Every structure is written in C-alpha cells, then in structure tokens.
Image: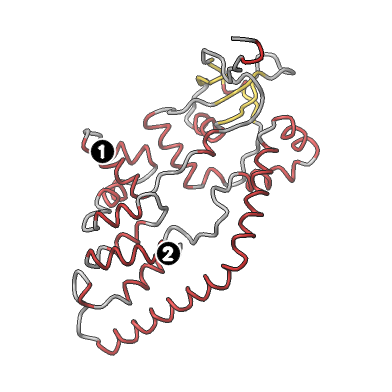
C-alpha cells in the first residue's frame, strides 16, 4: 500500500492498565451528577458485571506517565466510588475527544424488555439484572410483563420509539384494533406521553375496551370523556402552534449542537476553555450531551 493510501490506525493494538490517579479528565462533571439515575445505573452495572466498554485515553505530552481521559468519565467515577485503583484502557493515537457513545441510540422500552426477557430465559437472576440496570426487582418484573396483552402490530410500531412504560399499561386496557389506532395517533402527533395515552383511552368507546367501564357513575364518565376530548383538542392546538417554525428552529438548534460537539471533541480547545473560561465549559458540555433537540415530555408519565 502506498504512503498516500495508508490508513491511520485510531488506537494502539494493545490496551494499557492505567492507575486511576494517572488519568487527567478533559471535562468537569456537573454538580449533582452522582445523584442522577444515569450515574446510579452505570454504578450498578459496573458493580454487577464490571466494565463492558473500556475508557479511551491518550498520553499526556506534558505529564509523563499520565493520560488524558477522552471517553468514559462516568465509568471512571464509578470505579473510584467502588474503590478500584486501576483500569484497562484503549489508547488513542491522537487527542481528539471523539466518543462513540454519542453515536449510540439508547435502548427503547421495547428493546429493553426483549433484553431482560432473554437474560431471564438464559438463567440470569432478576436481582443480578436489577443490579446491572440500577433497578429494583419489582421494576424488572414490571418490565418483563410490559408487553403482555399488547398487540404484536403495536409492538412493531413502537419498537424503536422512546415512550414511557405507562403507555403500554394504558394500551393494554384497549382491544387490539384500538391499540393499533392509538399507537398510530401517537406516532402521527409525535406524542408518546402518558397524558396523551390517557386522553386516547378516555376517548375510546366501551366496545373497544378490553374491560368495560363501570356503569355506576354515568354522569361522571361523561364528564371525564368531555375532559379527555378537551385535552385532545388542546394538544392538537399546541402541535399546530409550533409546526410552522418547528422545522427551521430544530435545524438551527441541531446545527448549533453539532458545532459545539465538534469544538468539544478537540482536546486542545477543551483545555483552553477550561483554563480561560471554565464557567462556560460546563454549559457547553451540557449542550453537547443533549441526546435530542426535539422537545419531549417527561418520560415518567
């Protein structure tokens, strides 16, 4: 192969064991991060099964024997909290802070359900799965049963979509035909919140419910139905009010986020900002770590 066509190798062929106190982080972790659910999940996973993905480092030219930490800051903090003193690292051949974690699509609830079911079928105890995911056994059991009573067509429609588990609890109260219709409405409105799913359930005729509503409070049920219809109308107005500018605004924000990420992927720029404008660094990192610009409601309900 000619010199001009030679491909540059991004990492050294062998990993290195590096003491944690020889690692120099290239970003400052936000206050309160250790209390976040994301960090607790990482801590539980590392404690239960160890590191799945090795941190990425590069030699620090001004500090012999030390390494800049390019990727894996949360994993390193978890190891520190667990009392680990050294870690096996991939060694990058340059100091660009590229992180492939940002290119990974996070598991959707349907995908997580499948992963948990497969683990259980292979004999992994629920307690072990819970430790790895930072969840209690009750939550694992709930995720295992999440798709019970859900139409396979609905599972296929929502398999790649981030939506809260409560949505499946509400869909389960409908017959399969209505489940499909409700899922298509959520996709059409790009709204997967529990609130919208409740509105769809409230607007569902009794004949399309898995179990008929109690007849004790007819007037009360009518009031609830009217309330749900108003909620649906209000949601549609909200969608209409932003659709004219949403595309352009989202494009601008996406381009801005991409530019900030490109800057922070350059270790030299990160070091300069940390030295001269440290108050900006945390905010820039928060912008760069946003998974999606599109506004989404709280995934809880």
Residue depicted at x 37% and y 73%: 199
Location of mark 1 (residue):
118
Residue 273 location in percent, x, y? 76, 38
Residue depicted at x 38% and y 41%: 133
Nearer to us in this view, 17 or 15: 15
Image quadrant occupied by the C terminus? bottom left
Q: Are marks 1 and 2 in contact (CB under 8 Å)?
A: no
Query: Seen in the image, is 90 located left or right of residue 155?
Result: right
Element type at mark 1 = helix
Q: Nearer the viewer, mark 1 or mark 2?
A: 2
Query: Seen in the image, is 251 located left or right of residue 53?
Result: right
Nearer to us in this view, 220 or 32: 220
Q: Is residue 190 above or below residue 82?
A: below
Give me the C-alpha separation between circle 1 and circle 2.
31 Å
Residue 185 location in percent, x, y? 38, 67
Q: In terms of image quadrants, where is residue 191?
A: bottom left
Location of mark 2 (residue):
188
The extreme bottom residue here reads 219
Q: Residues within 10 Å of mark 1 (few under 14, many from 20)?
A: few
Query: Seen in the image, is 107 located left or right of residue 142?
Result: right
Residue depicted at x 67% and y 38%: 262
Element type at mark 2 = helix
Residue 140 location in percent, x, y? 30, 47
Q: In terms of image quadrants, where is residue 91?
A: top right
Residue 285 location in percent, x, y? 65, 43
């Amino acid at each position: 192969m000619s010199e001009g066509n030679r491909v540059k190798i991004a990492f050294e062929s062998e990993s290195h064991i590096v003491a944690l106190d020889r690692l120099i982080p290239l970003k400052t972790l936000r206050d309160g991060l250790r209390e976040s659910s994301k960090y607790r999940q990482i801590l539980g996973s590392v404690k239960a099964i160890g590191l799945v993905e090795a941190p990425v480092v590069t030699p620090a030219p001004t500090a012999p024997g030390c390494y800049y930490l390019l990727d894996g800051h949360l994993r390193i903090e978890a190891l520190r909290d667990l009392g680990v003193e050294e870690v096996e690292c991939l060694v990058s051949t340059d100091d660009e802070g590229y992180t492939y974690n940002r290119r990974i699509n996070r598991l959707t609830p349907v995908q997580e359900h499948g992963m948990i079911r497969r683990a259980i079928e292979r004999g992994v105890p629920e307690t072990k799965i819970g430790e790895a995911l930072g969840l209690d056994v009750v939550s694992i059991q709930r995720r295992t049963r999440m798709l019970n009573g859900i139409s396979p067509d609905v599972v296929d429609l929502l398999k790649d979509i981030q939506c809260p588990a409560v949505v499946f609890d509400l869909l389960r109260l409908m017959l399969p035909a209505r489940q499909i219709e409700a899922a298509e409405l959520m996709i059409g409105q790009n709204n997967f919140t529990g609130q919208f799913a409740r509105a769809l359930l409230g607007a569902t005729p009794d004949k399309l419910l898995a179990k008929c509503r109690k007849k004790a409070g007819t007037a009360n049920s009518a009031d609830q139905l009217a309330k749900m219809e108003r909620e649906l109308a209000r949601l549609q107005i909200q969608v209409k009010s932003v659709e004219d500018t949403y595309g352009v605004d989202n494009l601008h924000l996406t381009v801005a986020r991409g530019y900030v990420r490109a800057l922070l992927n350059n270790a030299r720029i990160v070091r300069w900002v940390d030295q001269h404008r440290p108050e900006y660094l945390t905010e820039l990192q928060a912008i760069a770590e946003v998974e999606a610009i599109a506004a989404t409601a709280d995934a809880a309900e």
